[in-house]
Image (spheres, grey):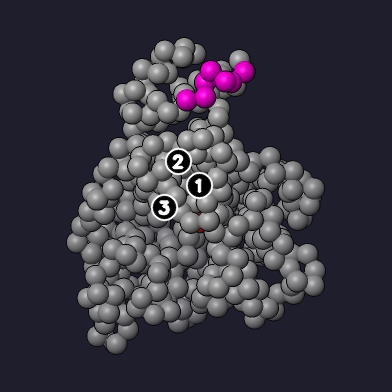
Amino acid sequence: MLTYQDAYDILSKYSQTHILKYYNSLSDAERKSLLSQIELLDFSLLKNVEDKAEENKRGKFEPLDAVGISEIRQRKDEFMTAGINAIKNEKVGAVLLAGGQGTRLGYDKPKGMFNIGVNKELYIFQCLINNILSVVKKAGAWIPLYIMTSEKNDEDTRNFMREMKNFGYNSDYITYFIQDMAPSVGFDGKILMESKNRIAMSPNGNGGWFSSIVRAGLLNEIKKNQIEWLNVFAVDNVLQQIADPLFVGAVLCSGSQSGGKVVKKASPDERVGVLCLENGKPAIVEYYEMTDEMRNRLNADGQLAYNYGVILNYLFNVEKLEAIVNDKLPVHVVKKIIPYINENGEQISPSEPNGYKFETLVLDMVSMQDSCLSYEVARENEFAPVKNSEGVDSVETARELLKKNGIEI
Ligand code: UTP
């Protein structure tokens, strides 16, 4: 356990001694808690604020074609048979990324607990479970479901799912694991305080999901159960198709090491990451990294060359994941709204972004794969993200899409 002096010395090295400003006014228990938070801090993250300009050094991009909807339709039986067999033989697990804070939605509980229903209750978790249950029924086998939470929402998530009897999912096949946290800083790089004895910490992005699985001791179980593929997906797409047998089958038939579901871009300027090649390997180029030339380039058939946006639904091979588990993912420095106490000890809840969080992202794992099948799905059937309370990708737009797909809300 650190002493006050140890903590002071460490913090001095990183110009962060303000963290101890209220130390003298704290109780013994609060002092202990603050010192142990300092002990666990990863100070190496802080230099990413200065290195921000370096963050986006990328290689040579080239377009990557997708297996399109019409080809998928033609090869439906082949893909379906391969996918259903893999699921039936329990080779496929699903990983729900539910550790985010959903700040844009402005809902103070885990996003999955949000009731998207209008005339009836329909929770986001329920939409996802209904979707995976339809595959379970088709394959006649339960699919192991791993749910990533964070320290901030783990208890609420588990209690809610228990209360809701997992919306009919077999609890023997649900496993929770908790992701890591990272400190939040102001624009000046100073660590923010949530209260006089608590450092403002937030989940460290969705990229740490596999290392958190390993740390939780779940890889042994995955290997013991001979699960070969993990379908990783976001909590906030209420039309998310999970362990989709056609997708699994297409990846298996293609011999690819991984797969990513994509939708055709709505317009060249759509703010979405595009699955492409970088230095000949699969990668995702963010919308802000694309030049105008890339955005507007057309194929010989008149389609956008960089045409396929990712929807945070990937299939990864467990053996490959194990091989890359120690490879470093880039740390993204993301502007966010972070509640904090100011220099007068007053609680501030900003309405605009006031600092940075440090996040690693699952999309960067695609760059670590030798190959990735870009698999096109129809946006109107599979992509209804709930990011904002109103406007684009909001509760409203997701409700419309649910209705269009015949789901009663
Ligand atoms: P987002 O990037 O939309 O982040 O997450 P968010 O935290 O949910 O929302 P905002 O930006 O604060 O409004 C995409 C997916 O990744 C998960 C989210 O739960 C969502 O499924 N995620 C995000 C994590 O599991 N952990 C994280 O640290 C961040």
Which mark is on residue 338?
1
Q: CA distance from mark 1 to mark 3?
A: 9 Å
Which amino acid is tagged 3?
A: Lys
Q: Position of residue 400 (x, y in %)?
A: 64, 78
Residue 26 is inside the magenta segment: yes
Residues shaded magenta: 21-27
Element class at badge 2: loop
Element class at badge 3: strand
Q: Position of residue 271 (x, y in %)?
A: 40, 69
Residue identifier under label 3: 335
Alpha-carbon neighbours of circle 2 within 10 Å: few (<14), some, or many (≥20)? many
Residue 268 is inside the magenta segment: no
Q: CA distance from mark 3 to mark 2?
A: 10 Å
Which amino acid is tagged 2?
A: Ser
Instruction: Write the residue at 34% across / 23% down.
Output: 12
Instruction: Write the residue at 40% across / 67% down.
Output: 272
Q: CA distance from mark 2 to mark 1?
A: 7 Å
Quadrant (top left, top right, bottom left, bottom right) of the C terminus = bottom right
Instruction: Write the residue at 32% across / 50% down.
Output: 368
> Foreground residue, 221 or 94?
94
> Foreground residue, 249 or 117?
117
Residue identifier under label 2: 184
- Tell me whether the residue at label 2 lies in contact with that at label 1, contact meaning CB atoms closer than 8 angstroms: yes
Q: Is residue 283 above or below residue 342?
A: below
Q: Is residue 251 visible?
A: no
Which amino acid is tagged 1?
A: Ile
Quarter of the image where one finds residue 269: bottom left
